[in-house]
Image: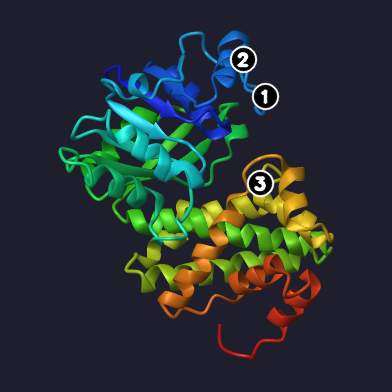
Amino acid sequence: MTKQKIGVLGAGTWGTALARLLAENGHDVTIWSALPEELKSMATTHRHPNLPGMQLPAALHYTADMADICAGRDLLVFAVPSVFVRSTAKKAARYLPDGQLIVDVAKGIEEKTLFTLSEVIESELHARPGHEGCRVVALSGPTHAEEVARDLPTLIVAAAREEADAQKVQHIFTNPNFRVYTNTDRRGVELGGAVKNVIALAVGVALGLDYGDNAKAALITRGNAELARLGVAMGCQAATFAGLSGMGDLIVTCTSMHSRNLHAGMLIGRGMDVETAKKEVGQVVEGINALPAARRLAKKYKVEMPIVEAMGAILDGRLSARSAVATLMGRDLKRE
């Protein structure tokens, strides 16, 4: 594919790993951060503090200027934490041309609006005159930055309303170690990426209680059933939740020690309070951010999500971790 001019908004582990991948693919890549010192360190050392085994290409560029990162880009990648997606889109909107193609790689549901993050970005851009043609592609799947940074084989899904947009992103990102599929069920792909973090918290809690592999497998399987029920009620395709962005992302987040959500859940299961667990993990725990929205979606669409509700009871302090698991085990008997 011809060389593309790409801006990556966010210098966290995922944004940086993808910026490196895109630069290695031969594209002209600039990373933006609101923290100039973070950029200075990366530009000087060619390292990311949370990806110690990764060498950043010398060809990467860095900027703390929003106007600069938005100017003349063939593609703009949103890689900021979910809670900052709306504010970042609002700041970027004034500098973006109409028709800008955007890729969102953050995972979450906005609590206030219950929008997926692609919908959040679109709501900010389309509200500004002259930006109605901006398009957003969601890139999601079982992808730990630590492994992508080491060029380990990875598969992911580019989801967009228009197949052509997903295909363009597919060709820009694909390389021998990073295979991209396309999907037009964008909401389903994003829903999987957000809610699986809540299930991973629950799996972590079970591991923290030393409940073993049987409990882990049950929570992953039944958690995916909850996710699929919610997705279908919201108009998504059932098959999406059996794919990479559904069961695939759920498996990797619930089994890998790279998973911040699993780690946080384990700490909570061992008796640590939520705020202390977040500090111990040291990075954003998206499952905690996504939990309130997941509970509201379940209520709005009248979908039973007992694992999500159990995590809500634990984080609200209404039940201990052990009592919440006992509540799940004591539910009425039924067909699978």
| Marks 2 & 1, CB-CB < 8 Å contact | yes
Secondary structure type for disc 3: loop
Can the viewer see residue 167? yes
Q: Is residue 261 left or right of residue 209?
A: left
Q: Nearer the viewer, mark 3 or mark 1?
A: 1
Which residue is disc 3 drawn over? Answer: 259
Q: Nearer the viewer, mark 3 or mark 2?
A: 2
Q: Nearer the viewer, mark 2 or mark 1?
A: 2
**In terms of depth relative to the viewer, which is nearer, 220 or 282?**
282
Q: Quadrant of the C terminus?
A: bottom right
Q: CA distance from mark 3 to mark 2?
A: 25 Å
Label for residue 41?
A: 2
Which residue is disc 1 drawn over? Answer: 49
Label for residue 131?
A: none
Q: Is residue 92 left or right of residue 260?
A: left
Q: Which residue shows up at 39% across the image and 31% down it?
A: 174
State the image coordinates of residue 305 (x, y, percent, origin top left): 54, 75
Secondary structure type for disc 1: loop
Q: Quadrant of the N terminus?
A: top left
Q: Residues within 10 Å of mark 3 (few under 14, many from 20)?
A: many
Question: Which amino acid type corresponds to the residue marked 2 in the rendered image?
Answer: Ser
State the image coordinates of residue 296 (x, y, percent, origin top left): 48, 70
Is residue 64 placed above or below 220 in the rendered structure? above
State the image coordinates of residue 134 (x, y, percent, origin top left): 22, 39
Secondary structure type for disc 2: helix
Q: CA distance from mark 3 to mark 1?
A: 17 Å
Q: Which residue shows up at 41% across the image and 67% down it?
A: 231
Q: CA distance from mark 2 to mark 1?
A: 9 Å
